[in-house]
Amino acid sequence: MQTSERRTALRSPKDIVVAREYARELGSLLGMSSIGATELATAISEVARNALTYGGGGEVVLSQFAEAKRRGIRVTVEDKGPGIADIDLAMKDGYSTGESLGLGLPGARRLVDKFEIVSKVGMGTRVTMTKWAS
Amino acid sequence: MGTSILKQRDYLIATVQSDLSDEEWQQFQDDLVRRIGLTRARAVVIDVTEIDVLDSYAARILGTTVEMVRLRGAEAIIVGIQPDVAFAMVQLGLTLDRVTMALDLEDGLEYLDSIGPRRRHSIHAD
């Protein structure tokens, strides 16, 4: 399997735009539908903003992968922030510790095919999202 | 920068031309709210046709911009949300409940023409 990986350091909100542009490029390369690419770009925006606002920044890694004749994009957003103490609560619609609408994580989960979150208090948070292209 | 604000009759047409960063959204909001006073615009059309991602941050900025425009005494309407964007926004859980929407610029202008003849007549009175 060919792996082409694109990494974006998350230091400022501008980097969010860069990461989602990469997702669109990779999506069109893999023949992802226009709606699919928009959903993925929106999900990346939400999760990356979370990492920036609450995790103090981090990194977005995009890679393409193939599994059982299907192709897709895998996105990992990682930060070394304070971590999330109660993930179930953070995944609830409308829950926010900041000024946001509290839709970021639960909303992003609805926009992708697979969503996984691992967080350790004091260590950081890693969100892995998968979106099928075919 | 990916935005432009043009005056047309007593309307402001604010076009968001590309994917904006958070700072650019903020700048756009500031400029627009200020320009209402400078131009004495009666209404604002915010055209987002070119936008291909509207996340919760951008939606919040759009919602608060519309509120601010109203507080300045003008009408506001958002036009041009693309089908894919509408699809993603709904799944994300975003609604812009208190905001008037129209399909495109033409429809938006038609709507504004239809709601405010009185004040426009007083401005353009012979």
Image (cartoon, coloured by chain):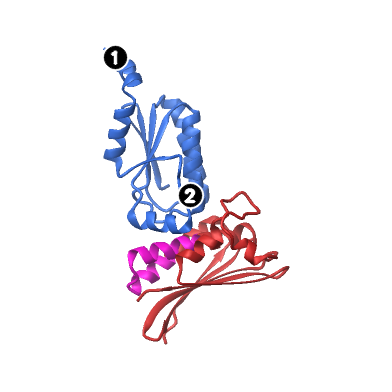
Chain colours: A red, B blue
Between A87 and A2, the residue placed more toward the observer is A87
- The residue where tag 2 is placed is B58
Q: Secondary structure at mark 1?
A: loop
- Side (left or right) of A79 relative to B76: right
Q: Amino acid at mark 1?
A: Ala
The earlier-in-sequence mark between 1 and 2 is 2
Decide: is B112 above or below A12: above
Amino acid type of the residue tagged 2 in the rendering: Ala
Q: Give the percent coordinates (x, y) of residue A122.
A: 73, 68
Residue A60 falls inside the magenta stretch:
no
- The answer to whether residue A19 shows anywhere in this view is no
Q: Which residue is mark 1?
A: B125
Q: Nearer the viewer, residue B33 or B78?
A: B78
Instruction: Quadrant for the N terminus of chain A, please.
Output: bottom left
Residue A37 in the magenta stretch? The answer is yes
Q: Residue at x 51, y 46 (%)?
A: B60
Is the C terminus of chain A in the top left, top right, bottom left or bottom right quadrant?
bottom left
Give how far across and how far down residue B71 sits, in percent: 50, 29
In front of the other: B125 or B83: B83
Q: Evaluate whether residue B18 shows in this view.
A: yes
Q: Where B82 falls versus A133 (above or below)?
A: above
Magenta segment main secondary structure: helix
Which element carries disc 2, helix, strand or loop? Answer: helix
Q: Neighbour class for label 2 at 10 Å: few (<14), some, many (≥20)?
A: some
- The magenta span reads A22-45
Chain letter of the residue beneath label 1 in the structure image: B
Q: Quadrant of residue A67?
A: bottom left
- Residues behind callouts 1 and 2 on a single chain: yes
Mark sitting on residue A11: none
